[in-house]
Image: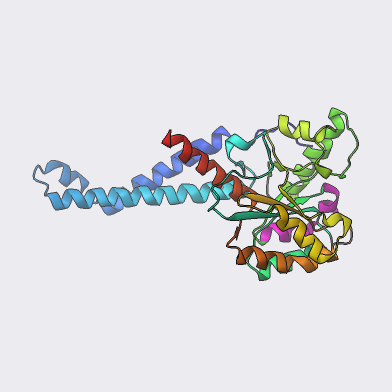
Amino acid sequence: MEQNKSFFWPQGILIALVCLTGTVGIGLMLLVKPNASEAQSSQNLSVNEMSANVGTQERIEEFKTMMLNSWQQEAQAKGVAPDVPLRFQGATIKEAKLPPEEKVIALTFDDGPWPKSTTQVLDILKKNKVKGTFFVVGQNVKIYPDLTKRVVAEGHTIANHTWHHWYHHMNPQVAAYEVANTTDIIYKTTGVKTSLFRPPGGHMTNGVAGYARNNKYAIIMWSSDSVDYSRPSVPKLINNIFRAAKPGGIVLMHDGGGDRSHTVKALPEIISKFRKQGYKFVTIPELLELQDKNQALVANKK
């Protein structure tokens, strides 16, 4: 069980990245400027030569930035880097605060992986080129590891929904088991170390949300509930979602935990209707990144 683990970059990783970027930069400078010593001895560099040097340096910096981003993405996939901005670690989020014109929406699916319905949901998302966020139950990950791997392999975000999906009150030790063990099996199965958590049923006071908050998970709730767990008719399910849908919203649906045939049937129409309204689909980390950038812009204008 992994408990009280920080989601910040280990110091050694940061040092390694700095060294690698420095090495790449120096190597490229030697390649593009083989006569650097001669240039230094000359006192008559033309304006054109100086401009060329500036352009070369800019290209080097762009290359270094590209390489650093690549290393960061690889580290995140291996569970080294956090998957949410710092300001959201330990916070509870129901939606992203975005301008009305930034029409993005996050589709989320709870209680999987589930042998039939998760497969159907993934097929629909793949066909429509949509990425979602899956809050998985630890014991289901253990039973269906291949299905869990498929979620990640197809570019979706995977997140923690406890081990047993219990609603009752839990003491600190049990709450820690429910959350940390699920994070651990997700990591061992997929290589992803998630810092996203959703409490079953949205219960915030039974112990698991408190443990998640204290351990810097972002607690992800929702702003638009399909109520699909009660198996409403397909038109009713769709209406439940769009009644509260808005830019920056988080839609709650379920791909596991029971009969999800109505959700599966409604999903293509949900996707189509959002697109007709001008929405783009994002994962929860992408949604939070958009809010983080928006808040930074607002702060800079003050």
Q: Which quadrant is home to the N terminus?
A: top right
For the question of whether residue 125 can be seen, the reply is: yes
Asked whether residue 192 is drawn in magenta, I would say no
Identify which residue, 61 or 126, lies in the foreground.
126
Residues in magenta, as a range: 138-153
Residue 177 falls in which quadrant of the image?
top right
Residue at far right of view:
168
Q: Residue at x 8, y 45 (%)?
A: 44
Q: Which residue is depicted at the point 79% across and 69% down?
A: 265
From this view, report whether residue 134 is shown above or below residue 196.
Answer: below
The answer, for residue 8, to whether it is visible in the render is: no
- In the image, is residue 243 above or below residue 187? below
Q: Is residue 96 left or right of residue 294?
A: right
Magenta segment's dominant SS is: helix
Q: Is residue 141 magenta?
A: yes
Q: Which picture quadrant has residue 272? A: bottom right
Task: Describe residue 9's horizontal placement relative to residue 159 as left or right.
Answer: left
- What colour scheme has been applied to the protein in the rendered image? rainbow
Please report the residue visible at 52 percent of the width from the left and 48 percent of the height from the top.
71
Closest to the observer: 51 or 295? 295
Where residue 165 sits, quadrant-wise, is top right
